[in-house]
Image: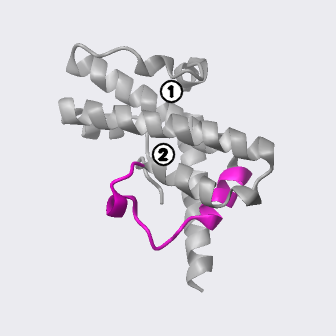
Amino acid sequence: MKLKKLTALLLAALLVLSFAVCGAKDSDKAADMSGDNAAMTGEPKTAEEALTLHKELLERENALLSENAELWEKVFMVADKGMTMQEDGKNYGDFLLDTVEAAKEQFTDKEYEWLKESTTEISNIENKLTELEEKYPEIMQKSMDGDMSMPRAMI
């Protein structure tokens, strides 16, 4: 019974996330970012620049999580529901990467490679978001008050 509720919750969260990404005003910026994390290379010089970068990174992360819903659903189904990221100090991307690694036999080679690349990028994004939030603590709420409607970590 708990598994059904958790599955329903994860699917609902994934749907909301996909709607948030589709409705984002700046989604073109996220789509234009290359796979080499171009937006993460520059350092913001002001809180305003940090806020813009923070929003772009959140949009990119949400785009990655919305890109292949069926495959992410497989990942969420095999995730260790008893483990929270805070327990082991990992960020969301590291948690997803560990989940993918633990269940790699459940994915095709192509799916596994795509998931590894995506979770590595999410981990890098999360690291950059954390750096920005530590340097500019005020941007977290401002960024979330914008177009984004989902928290960074869904699991």
Residue plotted at (60% across, 45% down): 18
Q: Is residue 75 left or right of residue 44?
A: right
Can residue 136 be seen by looking at this rendering? Answer: no
Q: CA distance from mark 1 to mark 2?
A: 24 Å
**Magenta span:** 70-91
Q: Position of residue 74 (x, y in %)?
A: 69, 59
Sooner in the amino-acid sequence: mark 1 or mark 2: 1
Q: Which residue is mark 2?
A: 93
Q: Quadrant of residue 116?
A: top right
Residue type of the residue flagged with mark 2: Gly
**What's the image's color scheme?**
one colour
Q: Nearer the viewer, residue 149 or 2?
A: 2
Q: Is residue 137 left or right of residue 38?
A: left
Q: Is residue 37 left or right of residue 1?
A: left
User: Looking at the rendered structure, which numbered label has been put on residue 25?
Assistant: 1
Q: Nearer the viewer, residue 150 or 6?
A: 6
Q: Is residue 49 above or below residue 148?
A: above
Q: Is residue 84 above or below residue 15?
A: below
For the N terminus, which image quadrant?
A: bottom right
